[in-house]
Amino acid sequence: MLKSTEENDDEGIEVSSRLFSFLILGVALVFIGVMVLVIASVFLSSSGSVGVVIFIGPFPIVFGSGPDAIWLILIGIVLAVLSIVLFLAVKRRWKTLSD
């Protein structure tokens, strides 16, 4: 004889609608920013600097070209260090609160 029980099989992380809205807004802003840069570089075609910083977790992937690319790399390194420090601080705080 089989018992029929209804269980919630959704064991994923619940995300609030506000947080999801911020996520979508962030992706949209990045997309719009990239499109603005591409359009500006096509129509202006002047010598300028281009740089990209992509964060995967706390680790940055930084690349650029032009005379000011070194500044973009330095900013990426500073942001990476700050994000690692912030991640560790939040992790330590979360651990003390959960104990």
Image (cartoon, rainbow, N blue to C red):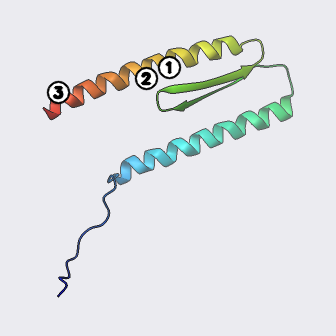
- Which residue sits at x=38%, y=47%? 19
In the rendered view, does 53 fall on the left or right side of 8?
A: right
Residues at discs 2 and 1 in contact (Cβ within 8 Å): yes
Check disc 2 and report the residue beneath it: 83
| Foreground: disc 1 or disc 3 | 3
- Which residue sits at x=84%, y=29%? 44
How many numbered discs, if any? 3
Q: Quadrant of the C terminus?
A: top left
In the rendered view, does 86 fall on the left or right side of 5?
A: right
Q: Residue furthest front?
A: 1
What amino acid is found at the position of numbered circle 2 in the picture?
A: Ser
- Point out residue 14 in the picture as x, y percentages from the top left corner: 32, 54
Q: Secondary structure at mark 1?
A: helix
- Point out residue 54 in the picture as x, y percentages from the top left corner: 59, 31
Check disc 3 and report the residue beneath it: 96
The answer to which of 90 and 41 lies nearer the viewer is 90
The answer to whether 5 is drawn above or below residue 82 in the figure is below
Residue 76, quarter of picture: top right
